[in-house]
Amino acid sequence: MQRIAMVAGELSGDVLGAGLIQALKRRHAGLRIEGIGGPAMRAAGLHSLYPMEALSIMGLAEVLRHLPRLVALRHRLVCHFRDHPPEVFIGIDSPDFNLGLERCLRTLGVPTAHYVSPSVWAWRRSRIKRIAQSVDLMLTLLPFEPPYYRAQGVPVVFVGHPTADRYGFDLDAAQFRSCLGLSGEGPVLAVLPGSRQGEVARIGPIFAATVAQLVRRQPELQLIAAMATPGLRRLFQRQLEAVGLSRCRLIEDNAKAVMGAADVVLAASGTATLEAMLLQRPMVVAYRVAPITAGVIAALRLIKTRYFALPNLLADEALVPEYIQGKATPQNLTRAVEDLLADPERASYLRQRFRQLHGILRCNANERAADALEQLVSP
């Protein structure tokens, strides 16, 4: 390989892309990679044609509002890669943007791969037909995803999850607490309200009200929150102040230590739930999408799964409490957190199950993904 292209639209995809770039560059000296990525991919060697923030949009309502700009950006990328064709294009997550880009490039003769399966097993299952028109190869992170693609004749490889490769099986909460300067007295609650502005705007006030209730009922509770960016830190700080809470420590860019130090994690659904599972921490998961997005999903009956929290999906059982939309209330979340804090036997069982799930995902994913891409380019 000499020249490839990648596009990632969010922080989690940026981390995945960086690991893949590193694996490929170890095999191919002088490899040139261009497209769109964030700080991790740029540090690994990506030449980013546009800022990744241009794609960090989620939900039907949000995408519709930004649609003209996104369509124009995709057109510019198609023109660029038409004039400077890569040996392979890899779209990393962000399916609403990347699948259309992949379809256009595939018609121009560029081999295409998509890294991270869209949640076709959960909703909009008919997307597999569109995916089949867009990609020459699907790389999945989760073991239950490949059968959906094989049934439609889409080439697919389960590579495992790179985050699972980075985490050890034996992690000591005391070390994380010492690193963060936390007292050894009193239980610790970690709060992760999301990594996007829209997520924190919707679920942040619910989490803030939940934490305020918990502190009133358990004054000894120690509170820490992981914030993805300075802007999100300022937003969540205002949400905490609105409920009269000032004793929650907000920590930027160290989610692993924040969750590792906790007795219980309160998290917005997403990558944080995977990391909490790998750290073997009991968790309560919640999520809210924009009302118009929720309305469309409900009206069209697009949801096809019993669970949405990743540990529950992997285990195919309700390991952790999960609450979505109207069920994500301070009352429900407070009760769920208190139940976990008061039940050490449940916490011990969850640690055991999380360790088992960790083993399933730990597959040296970066190298397996690189192997699959090499076979695609030079079968």
Image (tube, rainbow, N blue to C red):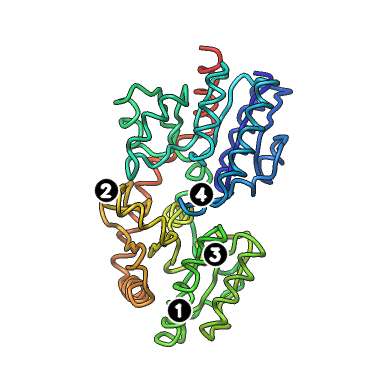
Q: Nearer the viewer, mark 2 or mark 3?
A: 2
Mark 1: give few (<14), some (14-19) or many (20+) Cα within 10 Å: many
Kindly indicate the quadrant of the structure image that contains residue 129: top left
- Residue 188's spot in the image, x, y percent? 47, 73
- Residue 100's spot in the image, x, y percent? 51, 32
Q: Which residue is mark 2?
A: 316
Q: How many marks?
A: 4
Q: Are marks 2 and 3 in contact (CB under 8 Å)?
A: no
Q: Looking at the rendering, in which quadrant would you find the N terminus?
A: top right
Residue at 31% of width from left, 30% of height from top? 147
- Provide the secondary structure element on which disc 1 rests: helix
Sequence-first tag of 1 and 3: 1
- Amino acid at pointer 1: Ala
- Amino acid at pointer 3: Val
Q: Residue 173 shows which numbered tag?
A: none
Q: Nearer the viewer, mark 4 or mark 3?
A: 4
Sequence-first tag of 2 and 3: 3
- Provide the secondary structure element on which disc 4 rests: helix
Sequence-first tag of 1 and 4: 4
Sequence-first tag of 4 and 3: 4
Q: Which residue is mark 1?
A: 209
